[in-house]
Image (tube, rainbow, N blue to C red):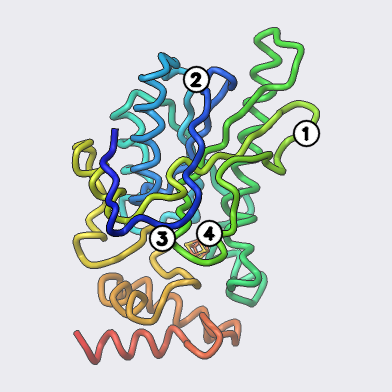
Amino acid sequence: MRCRTPALATTASPAPEVNLHDYDLVLLNTSAGKDSQAMITHVVELADAQRYPRHHFLAVHANLGDRVEWPGTRELAERQAEHYSIRFEEVRRERGDLLEQIEARRKFPSSTARYCTSDQKTSQVVKLMTREAAAFRGRGHDRPIRILNCLGLRAEESPARAKKSPLGPDPASNGRRDVTRWLPIFDWTEVDVWQTIGRSGVPYHPAYAAGMPRLSCVFCVLAGRKELVLAARLNPRLAQNYVRLEARIGHTFKPGLSMAEIVAEARATA
Ligand code: SF4
């Protein structure tokens, strides 16, 4: 199991370890980013220790759009799941990727209106849960499927995340599925995450080696200026698409920070 790093340990309550045998399906949400990757390794090691079979796992990647995510993200998510012989599914919003949705709404998402996460990710994963619940019933079960919904969120990422509970009921529950949300690496530091990835030997995305602290969307509305400038330098064509989108909808990427400014800074500091 992983080594803890006392010097950087957070004060967040440790994520309680669960008995996986209480669940029919363990759903591993993966962006292919470092936290998802470390979370998968950790849960798989727990499963092996508890002799819980891998065929009850399902890794799900909610794709925000191939042009919106870092190149190779979907393929990497699948490869990471394959490494552990875990079933893999990709889900997408049928009515268009994130850029199409922004264009239709004529507004970028923000920290107070994160429709990017709710519509492009959470809703699509809930539809997958519905399909899994139907398949479970189709196998002759006459009770709700018990799903453990695992996410790689960490308390030290933000004060809002630190307030979350690492284990509890998931609002996706209904009469046909009983869903528990678990944040298995809630109290981990970034050092814990990289140590786990390092010893696992599973490949990680090259964007990290290029200096990016996070993966998922290339241009995240929650990212800082420095991060966005680096992303624009590494993805100049996509950055231009965002600049054109800003001009078409008359709304800036972030309050007080336009993609046009980000691109100008990326060029000036290249
Ligand atoms: S990475 Fe940022 S922009 Fe993309 S879905 Fe997540 S919060 Fe929204």
Instruction: Name the residue carrying label 1.
Output: 174
Of badges 3 and 1, the one in the foreground is 1
Of badges 3 and 2, the one in the foreground is 2
Q: Earlier in the sequence, mark 3 or mark 1?
A: 3
The quadrant of the rendering that contains the C terminus is: bottom left
Q: Earlier in the sequence, mark 3 or mark 2?
A: 2
Q: Earlier in the sequence, mark 1 or mark 2?
A: 2
The quadrant of the rendering that contains the N terminus is: top left
Residue 103, which numbered label? none
Instruction: Name the residue carrying label 2.
Output: 56
Q: SS class of the residue under badge 4?
A: helix
Q: Residue at x 64, y 77 (%)?
A: 106
Q: SS class of the residue under badge 3?
A: loop
Residue 223 at what x, y percent from top left? 43, 73
Spatial CA span between label 3 and label 2 = 31 Å
Q: SS class of the residue under badge 1?
A: loop
Residue 151 at what x, y percent from top left? 50, 44
Q: Residue at x 21, y 88 (%)?
A: 269
Instruction: Name the residue carrying label 4.
Output: 162
Spatial CA span between label 1 and label 2 = 20 Å
The three-letter amino acid code for the residue at tag 3 is Arg
Spatial CA span between label 4 and label 3 = 31 Å
User: Do the residues under discs 3 and 1 have CB atoms within 8 angstroms?
Assistant: no
User: Do the residues under discs 4 and 2 have CB atoms within 8 angstroms?
Assistant: no
From the viewer's side, name the closer residue of 168 and 41.
168
Q: Quadrant of residue 96?
A: bottom right
The three-letter amino acid code for the residue at tag 4 is Ala
Q: Quadrant of residue 47?
A: top left
Q: Is residue 249 left or right of residue 189?
A: right
Is the CB atom of the residue marked by disc 2 within 8 angstroms of ligand 1's nearest atom?
A: no
Residue 67, which numbered label? 3
Q: Residues within 10 Å of mark 4 (few under 14, many from 20)?
A: some
